[in-house]
Amino acid sequence: MDKKAIELAKYRLERAKQDLQDTELLYKNNSLLSANNRAYYAIFHAIQAVLAIERVDFKRHKDAIGYFNKNYINKEIFPRTLGRKIGQAFQIREDSDYDYKFIPKIEQTENQLETAKELISLVEEYINNSEIK
């Protein structure tokens, strides 16, 4: 396995974990719009960690997510249910950041947080398994 690719993947995973910690603090302080943003970035950085192993990178988030869905979700390397959750996370982050009429529901933010936790855990396991190969 490419050592530099694994190092980059681990770095991106650490960023995802930091975003997750930020999400939890923002959520506890009832700052739901910001928590939605950080939860999405935790998810996105976890996806980027997986793609780093393959040395694949995209400028646009939609392209990275599309590639991840096609090559990891559709092939069931990661659970199919995550594909829908990632799509929802992307949309909620967009609404939270750009729709000034959007009022987040606490359940949405809780779902964002749970999706980020789930994905980060699975990505960590994936990176560890990739490192062994």
Image (spheres, grey):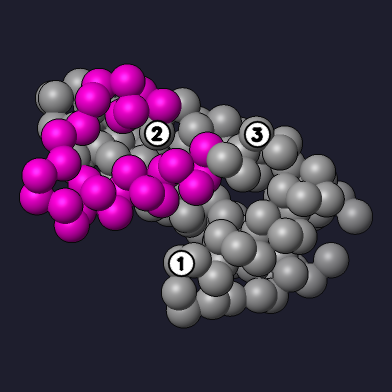
Instruction: Determine whether label 1 and label 2 are within 8 Å by CB.
Output: no
Distance CA(mark 3)–CA(mark 2):
13 Å
Bounds of the magenta segment:
85-111
In the picture of the structure, the residue carrying the numbered disc 2 is: 112
Could you say where residue 18 lies in the image, as x and y percent from the top left?
37, 44
Q: Residue 26 is drawn in which quadrant?
A: top left
Residue at screen point 25% across, 37% down: 35
In which quadrant is the N terminus drawn?
A: bottom right
| Sequence order check, earlier mark of 3 and 2 | 3
Kindly identify the amino acid type of the residue bearing the numbered disc 2.
Gln
Q: Nearer the viewer, residue 113 or 9?
A: 113
| Sequence order check, earlier mark of 1 and 2 | 1
Image-based side of 29 in relation to 130, left or right? left
Q: Is residue 36 visible?
A: yes
Distance CA(mark 3)–CA(mark 1):
19 Å
Kindly identify the amino acid type of the residue bearing the numbered disc 1.
His
Tell me, yes or no, whether the highlighted magenta stretch contains residue 95.
yes
Image-based side of 29 in relation to 24, left or right? left
Query: Which callout, 3 or 2, points to the residue nearer the camera?
Result: 3
* Secondary structure found at label 1: helix
Q: Residue 112 is drawn in which quadrant?
A: top left
Q: Nearer the viewer, residue 49 or 112?
A: 112
| Res. 81 mark | 3
Give the class, few, some or many, for how many residues have Cα within 10 Å of label 2's Cα (few <14, many ≥20).
many
Above or below 8: residue 118: above
In the picture of the structure, the residue carrying the numbered disc 1 is: 61
Could you say where residue 105 lies in the image, as x and y percent from the top left?
23, 25
Tell me, yes or no, whether the highlighted magenta stretch contains residue 96.
yes
In which quadrant is the C terminus drawn?
A: bottom right
* Secondary structure found at label 2: helix
Kindly identify the amino acid type of the residue bearing the numbered disc 3.
Thr
Could you say where residue 96 lies in the image, as x and y percent from the top left?
21, 46
